[in-house]
Amino acid sequence: MEKNTEGFTINKAAIVGFGAIGCIYGRRLYHLMGDNFAVIAGGKRAERLRLNGETINGEKIMPSVVEPENQYWKADLVIFAVKNHQLDSAINDIKNIITPDTIILPILNGVSAKDKINAAYPQNTVLYGLSKSDSQRTSNGINCTWEGLIQFGEANNTVVSEKVMAVKELFDKAKIPNEICEDMLRAVWIKFMRNVGMNQLSAITGATYSAFSQIEELNKALREVMAEVMCIAQSKGINITESDIEESVKIVCGSAPEGKTSMLQDIEAKRKSEVESFSGTVIEEGKKTGIPTPWNNSLYLLIRTKEKLYGAE
């Protein structure tokens, strides 16, 4: 992997979406950058953050809050850490925060965020990104048991661009674990495959991570759901194989036994889930490629039913 060492410096950074994921990395940027780091939020959320800040692992932080109507504060880097159903409003929220030189890094779940942001801001550098971590919101704030890392970059990073290197330099200074993947398309689709399997099955069954190793039927279902994603990825020329499914099963089974997926947390809290971005996307891609997706068809119907039963539309 070669590096392009031409200069681009990130002096100001912002996050849109300051929940269980955004807080993990936002805290690091806040400690490094002070008022040069901001959370983009409006309305009651902005008021709450200004008044109460956010607490992560018992530490209260009070980051600067920039509202979408702002006309003066501009970011060199904007990180998207929202849920997929919040993406459209988040895209609109950053229009006054960015310049044509601003780097945009989505780290939310799924495989479509980059394309949506690119369509809205074609003049900007929009990177591929994903996060691997373990955190959840509790009555005392955000509880993070594993900060994981952010993987990011262009689709291919055989030669690393100056803007990708600028993000890495910032993350290194902020002590945010990070990795530039040579093949980011493969990395994004592997995480998507895992999420489609473990998130949706846990949402339907209520299973914590330990159940995936203890219950043979659930383990088998996990492989079947992920296999549909693998076939779609292969049809797109993305290098995912059966060995990636087996590695994914090991990772899921080796996670914190009582840990819960983000989708299970959403279902238990009676919030809208990311089912549209998981099985919804798989079903749509299956139709485009002619690949059957019966497992994801069923999961979609069942999860949407659960949402409608508690009124999440």
Image (cartoon, rainbow, N blue to C red):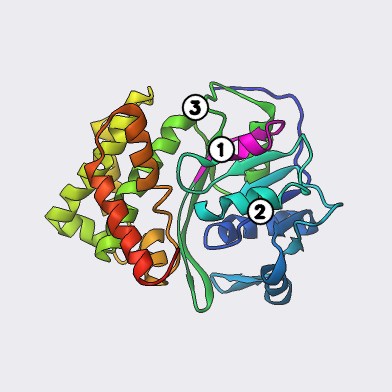
In which quadrant will I find the C terminus?
A: bottom left
Q: Which amino acid, mark 1? A: Lys
Q: Which residues, given as a range, are shown in magenta?
A: 116-130
The residue identified by callout 2 is 15
Q: Residue at x 31, y 67 (%)?
A: 258
Q: Nearer the viewer, mark 3 or mark 2?
A: 2
Spot occupied by residue 308 in the image (x, y as percentages of width and height): 37, 66
Q: Residue furthest left?
A: 216
Q: Which amino acid, mark 2? A: Ile
Q: Residue at x 38, y 72 (%)?
A: 310
Q: Which mark is residue 139?
A: none
Q: Nearer the viewer, mark 3 or mark 1?
A: 1
Q: Which mark is residue 114?
A: 1
**To which quarter of the image does residue 153 belong?**
top right
Q: Earlier in the sequence, mark 3 or mark 1?
A: 1
Q: Are marks 1 and 2 in contact (CB under 8 Å)?
A: no
In this orientation, which residue lies closer to the viewer: 212 or 116? 116
* SS at mark 1 in the image: helix
Q: Are marks 3 and 1 in contact (CB under 8 Å)?
A: no
Spot occupied by residue 62 in the image (x, y as percentages of width and height): 71, 69
Q: Which mark is residue 182?
A: 3
